[in-house]
Image: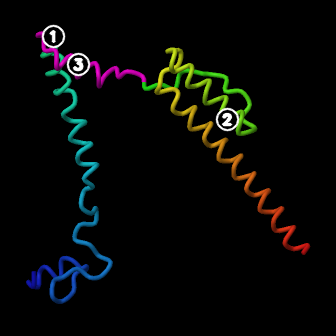
Amino acid sequence: MNHPENKERTGNRDVAGRFKPGHSGNPGGRPRRERVIGEMLDYMTPAVLERCYQAAMNDSTADRKLILDRGAPVPRGGTTTMDLGSLGSLADCQAAIQRVADAVGCGDLPPGDAAPMLALIDVARRTIENLDLDARLRALEERAASQ
């Protein structure tokens, strides 16, 4: 490192041979792990799929399952629509929850589709409660200010 030729060849080093501030010995930086893994998967995927396919054709149930699970996964819901009605009051929210529960109970609505609907109803319920609390607080503040 301290050899004179090294100092002349690169002007990015100090007298001791270390890189000067702002000058890296590896300007591209260390490869990001995700990028390296992604490149490796891109390289290996065709061969892995080919081996799984060959094994599946030779009656390997596990490999068939792997191909079906990864290549054509089961939809995770979100395709069902349902009229929740108005969500303008706590009673409306309670009625909507009951409609969703009834639909799940009789098999008309998959539980995976019910969860986002119930989350939406819960947001409406919390909004109604917050607006009600805000109105009550304002009334108390007005009453206290007038006394």
Q: Secondary structure at mark 2?
A: helix
Q: Nearer the viewer, mark 2 or mark 1?
A: 2
Magenta: main secondary structure equals: helix
- In depth, the one of 71 and 120 nearer the eye is 120
Q: CA distance from mark 2 to mark 1?
A: 53 Å
Please report the residue visible at 10 percent of the width from the left and 85 percent of the height from the top.
2
Q: Which residue is mark 2?
A: 93
Residue 82 drawn above or below residue 18: above
Which contiguous range is marked in magenta?
A: 57-75
Residue 60, image quadrant: top left
- Residue 65's disc is 3
Q: Secondary structure at mark 1?
A: helix
Q: CA distance from mark 2 to mark 3?
A: 42 Å
Residue 50, image quadrant: top left
Location of residue 6 in the rendering, given as x and y in whole percent from the top left corner? 13, 79
Please report the residue visible at 27 percent of the width from the left and 63 percent of the height from the top.
29
Q: Earlier in the sequence, mark 1 or mark 3?
A: 1
Q: Which residue is mark 1?
A: 57
**Left or right of 11 in this view: 116:** right
User: Counting other residues with Cα less than 10 Å from the Cα at mark 1, is it few (<14), some (14-19), or many (20 or more)?
Assistant: few
Location of residue 107 in the rendering, given as x and y in whole percent from the top left corner? 49, 15
Q: Amino acid at mark 2?
A: Cys
Q: Earlier in the sequence, mark 2 or mark 3?
A: 3
Q: Nearer the viewer, mark 2 or mark 3?
A: 2
Q: Amino acid at mark 1?
A: Met
Residue 69 included in the magenta stretch of the image = yes
